[in-house]
Image (cartoon, rainbow, N blue to C red):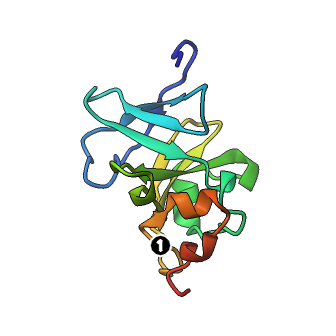
């Protein structure tokens, strides 16, 4: 993983539970579909994140306009969406949080963790099932 030329991303509100950490970088793992959201304020803090569209074709959360405006506004192509992965010892226990994605503006390099208000998506979607194409656990209503 190389960090050369990586632009820092500012989260004015921080990430939920880590509001004091505001500066991050994203590093892509060259051997997988994973990314690492690394805090530049506290080097002990790092999240594993993924693009939702790698596994979940039906993931289309309704993001409040206020979140989009907070980080710079614009059209859909101005934003990238990532999901935080909760690691576990066993692959079958690894989950992703579909209810609170990370939204990053690709021009302003500002980010925000979004809270999806309608409870349509799971906060603990099983990653192994998503990889297999079984995204029935994407919605909390299924």
Left or right of 129, for residue 47: left
Residue 5: image location, x then y, percent = 58, 15
Q: Is residue 24 above or below residue 13?
A: above
Q: Residues within 10 Å of mark 1 (few under 14, many from 20)?
A: some
- The answer, for residue 75, to whether it is visible in the render is no
Quadrant including the C terminus: bottom right
Which residue is identified by label 1? 122
Left or right of 80, for residue 123: left
Residue lying at the far top in this picture: please name it: 4
Numbered label tally = 1
Q: Nearer the viewer, residue 40 or 52?
A: 52
Q: Residue at x 25, y 53 (%)?
A: 17
Residue lying at the far bottom in this picture: please name it: 141
Say which element carries label 1: loop
Q: Residue at x 48, y 27 (%)?
A: 8
Q: Residue at x 58, y 67 (%)?
A: 63
- The answer, for residue 20, to whether it is visible in the render is yes
Residue 123: image location, x then y, percent = 42, 68
Residue 29: image location, x then y, percent = 55, 28
Q: Nearer the viewer, residue 13 or 52?
A: 52
Left or right of 139, for residue 77: right
Q: Residue at x 59, y 66 (%)?
A: 65
Residue 117: image location, x then y, percent = 47, 77
Q: Is residue 85 above or below residue 119?
A: above
């Amino acid at each position: 993983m190389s960090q050369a030329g990586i632009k820092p991303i500012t989260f004015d509100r921080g990430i939920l539970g880590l509001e004091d950490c505001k500066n991050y970088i994203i590093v892509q793992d060259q051997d997988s579909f994973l990314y690492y959201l690394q805090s530049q304020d506290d080097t002990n803090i790092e999240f594993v994140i993924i693009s939702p569209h790698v596994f979940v074709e039906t993931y289309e959360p309704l993001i409040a306009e206020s979140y989009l405006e907070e980080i710079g506004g614009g059209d859909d192509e101005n934003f990238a969406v990532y999901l935080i992965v909760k690691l576990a010892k066993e692959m079958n226990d690894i989950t992703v949080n579909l209810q609170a994605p990370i939204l990053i503006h690709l021009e302003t390099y500002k980010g925000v963790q979004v809270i999806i208000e309608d409870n349509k998506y799971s906060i603990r979607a099983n990653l192994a099932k998503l990889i297999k194409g079984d995204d029935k656990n994407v919605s909390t209503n299924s």
